[in-house]
Image (tube, grey):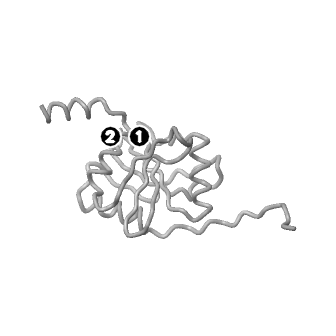
Amino acid sequence: MGRRFESYWNHHLKPESKLWQLVKKNITDVHWTRLESWAMPGVPDVYGIQDGVSVFLELKVTKSNKIALSPFQKNWLYNHYLQGGRSFIMLQTLGEGALRIFPSSVLHSPLSIGTEPQYKVQLPASPAAWTQVASYLLHSPLPKPRKVRSNTKNP
C-alpha cells in the first residue's frame, strides 16, 4: 500500500508542495522547516539552516516566467534583505523545466522585482547540481543593502 499511497498523495499535492518535496529530498544536509504562513502573512514558505547560516525560501511554481508575489511577500522579503538576511525566491517554470533562484535583493522596493535569475538549473537535476543550489543559497555573496535614510531626527 505504501507506493500506491505515495503515488496518490504526490498526484494531489499543490505545485508548491511538490517543489518543497523536491528541495527537501535533494538538499538533505540543510535542516529545513516548512512554515505555515497563515500565522503571519508574507513570511516565506521554508526556513533552512546549516552551520549557523540561515536562509528563507519563497517557493513559486508557474507555467510562465512571471513571479506572482503578494504585497505582503514582497514587503517581507524586501525588509528581510534590508536587514542583511538571506532570502530567495525559488521559481520552478513548468513549461521550461527549470528552477530559477532570485535573491530577495532583486526587490528594489516592495513594489518591483527584477526578471533575471541569479542562478538557474535544469530539472531534473543531478545530485551535483543540487549541491551547487545549496551552496548558492547558503554561501553566495549578496549585495549589501543600501541604507535607507529616515526623514526624522533623533532627539
Q: Secondary structure at mark 2?
A: helix
Q: Secondary structure at mark 1?
A: strand
In the figure, is residue 3 to the left or right of 120? left
Instruction: Look at mark 2 in the image and give the residue it sits on.
Output: 18
Please name which of the two marks, 2 or 1, marks the residue nearer to the observer.
2
- From this viewpoint, which residue is outermost toward the left? 1
Residue 6 in the image, given as x and y percentages of width and height: 20, 35
Q: If the image is split into quadrants, where does the N terminus sit?
A: top left
Q: Say above or below: 19 vs 86.
A: above
Instruction: Look at mark 1 in the image and give the residue it sits on.
Output: 61
Q: CA distance from mark 2 to mark 1?
A: 9 Å
Disc 2 crowd, CA 10 A, few/some/many (<14, 14-19, 20+): some
Q: Say above or below: 62 vs 113.
A: above
Q: Which mark is residue 97?
A: none
Quick one: 94 or 76, which is closer to the camera? 76
Amino acid type indicated by mark 2: Lys
Query: Quick check: marks 2 and 1 in contact, CB under 8 Å?
Result: yes
Amino acid type indicated by mark 1: Val
Q: If the image is split into quadrants, where does the C terminus sit?
A: bottom right
